[in-house]
Image: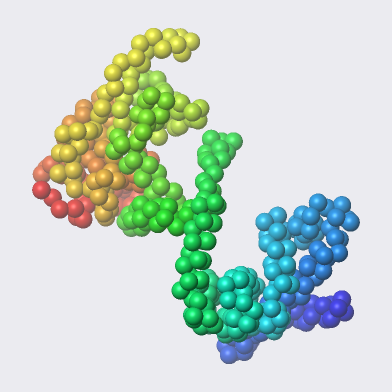
């Protein structure tokens, strides 16, 4: 076996030395197909070796706690990838001969093998060995046309083809089993990073996943030609917008006797002069720009502190852009006022044209609606917002974007 693998490695090295630019297109496509088949056949060899080494206990003999840990160090894999390799090797070993032959022949991919093995096991449990054997042939044929994700979706109705007499009953049982797994496996992990950021991970059940998509998908489309955020950044900002909307409704349950809220502490002088950071009540720091942005559409609770930070007097909340004023803004602006943005009012903050900390008043003449993305953009960028002669917002672009700095307006929202 070692000699054969050495010869294969040498052949691959020869291919790497070939000048692909000199190969015509038909031969390039044929070479790609051949390389893909070879990759799958080598995967079959690798999985066979992993399974044999796992069965012999080589990892523990050499001092590792498990085969996955040993593979991680030996092959420099992530522990998750190493664990999946061991699991797939076991699944392939237990799979019907037809599945192993399909991978060894390069007819299916490693990802498809996992799907086929899982599906065949389900068929075997529901309809017996004969139906499972039929399923192997059907799934291998489908694998020639469909990728692993679509193959798994099609596999949910495999009994229609191999055991139609029990298909409906089995499908209902499978659905109930899936619901049970989802209930068991659902979780969200919130891990605080050393710099104060949070890492989110988890698995949502089907219902929660649908709710999340329905909530954030409308907010993940680019908000205009100036939106340079990546897809991941847009999803991040959409999730923040959903949380902001939930906080704005006032329908969230109380937390420790208080309504749901974000508490930021800073000094008035530092806020007005953009000199110092603000502190969240959970300990993390915010830049002065972030504090000013949050203060645009927030409940301001003034407090007088002693020299040691001891609260001496706490006043009443001062609600800024809310109630009748916000309703007037919605009537006037119709949504985010930044040029090219179609975000509706419910996703928007009230932004002071002249910040309240700089002496700006809380009035219709000093406020515009901005979505979360463009609110951050205005606070961090060089755009200037003002009300035009007709009382509607207009934006002056920075000189580097438009040397003439011609005012721009949003034309998506109906004006009243």
Percent coordinates x, y for residue 355 in the rendering: 28, 30
Q: Looking at the image, can residue 255 be seen? A: yes
Percent coordinates x, y for residue 377 in the rendering: 35, 44
Vertical position of residue 43 compared to residue 368: above or below: below
| For residue 318, side relative to residue 285 (left or right) | left
Query: Toward the viewer: 115 or 108?
Result: 115
Residue drawn at (74%, 72%), measured in percent from left and top?
Answer: 93
Vertical position of residue 400 compared to residue 24: above or below: above
Residue drawn at (73%, 67%), measured in percent from left and top?
Answer: 90
Query: Toward the viewer: 346 or 96?
Result: 96
Percent coordinates x, y for residue 304 in the rendering: 37, 13
| For residue 389, side relative to residue 201 (left or right) | left
| For residue 369, side relative to residue 157 (left or right) | left
In the figure, residue 40 lies in which quadrant?
A: bottom right
Query: Toward the viewer: 164 or 270?
Result: 164
Percent coordinates x, y for residue 82 in the rendering: 71, 59
> How many dots with numbers?
0
In the figure, residue 109 lies in which quadrant?
A: bottom right
Vertical position of residue 38 compared to residue 296: above or below: below
Residue drawn at (29%, 22%), measured in percent from left and top?
Answer: 317
Residue drawn at (85%, 55%), measured in percent from left and top?
Answer: 60
Which color mode does the image show? rainbow
Q: Looking at the image, can residue 119 be seen? A: no
Vertical position of residue 397 compared to residue 278: above or below: below
| For residue 134, side relative to residue 104 (left or right) | left
Q: Quadrant of the N terminus?
A: bottom right
In the figure, residue 366 lies in which quadrant?
A: top left
């Amino acid at each position: 076996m070692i000699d054969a693998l050495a010869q294969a490695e040498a052949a691959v090295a020869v291919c790497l030395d070939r000048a692909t630019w000199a190969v015509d297109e038909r031969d390039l496509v044929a070479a790609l197909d051949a390389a893909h088949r070879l990759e799958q056949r080598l995967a079959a060899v690798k999985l066979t070796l992993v399974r044999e080494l796992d069965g012999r206990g080589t990892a523990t003999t050499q001092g590792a706690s498990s085969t996955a840990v040993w593979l991680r160090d030996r092959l420099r894999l992530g522990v998750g990838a190493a664990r999946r390799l061991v699991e797939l090797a076991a699944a392939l070993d237990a799979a019907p001969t037809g599945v192993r032959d399909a991978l060894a022949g390069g007819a299916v991919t490693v990802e498809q093998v996992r799907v086929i093995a899982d599906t065949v096991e389900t068929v075997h449990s529901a309809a017996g060995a004969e139906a499972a054997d039929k399923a192997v042939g059907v799934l291998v044929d489908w694998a020639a046309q469909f990728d692993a994700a679509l193959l798994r979706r099609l596999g949910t109705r495999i009994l229609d083809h191999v055991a139609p007499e029990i298909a409906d009953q089995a499908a209902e049982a499978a659905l109930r089993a899936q619901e049970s797994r989802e209930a068991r496996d659902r979780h969200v992990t919130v891990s605080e990073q050393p710099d104060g950021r949070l890492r989110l991970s988890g698995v949502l059940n089907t219902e929660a996943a649908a709710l999340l998509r329905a909530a954030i998908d409308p907010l993940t489309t680019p908000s205009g030609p100036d939106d340079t955020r990546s897809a991941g950044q847009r999803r991040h900002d959409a999730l923040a917008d959903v949380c902001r909307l939930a906080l704005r409704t006032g329908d969230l349950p109380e937390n420790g006797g208080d309504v749901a809220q974000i508490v930021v502490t800073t000094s008035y002088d530092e806020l007005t002069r953009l000199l110092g950071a603000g502190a969240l009540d959970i300990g993390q720091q915010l830049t002065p720009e972030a504090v000013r942005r949050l203060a645009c559409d927030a409940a301001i609770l003034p407090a007088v502190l002693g020299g040691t930070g001891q609260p001496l007097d706490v006043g009443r909340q001062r609600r800024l852009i809310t109630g009748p004023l916000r309703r007037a803004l919605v009537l006037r602006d119709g949504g985010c006022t930044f040029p090219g943005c179609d975000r509706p009012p419910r996703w928007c903050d009230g932004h002071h044209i002249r910040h309240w900390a700089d002496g700006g008043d809380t009035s219709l003449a000093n406020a515009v609606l901005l979505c979360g993305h463009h609110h951050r953009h205005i606070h961090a960028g060089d755009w200037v917002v003002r009300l035009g002669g007709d009382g509607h917002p207009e934006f002056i672009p920075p000189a580097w974007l438009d040397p003439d700095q011609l005012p721009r307006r949003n034309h998506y929202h109906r004006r009243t």
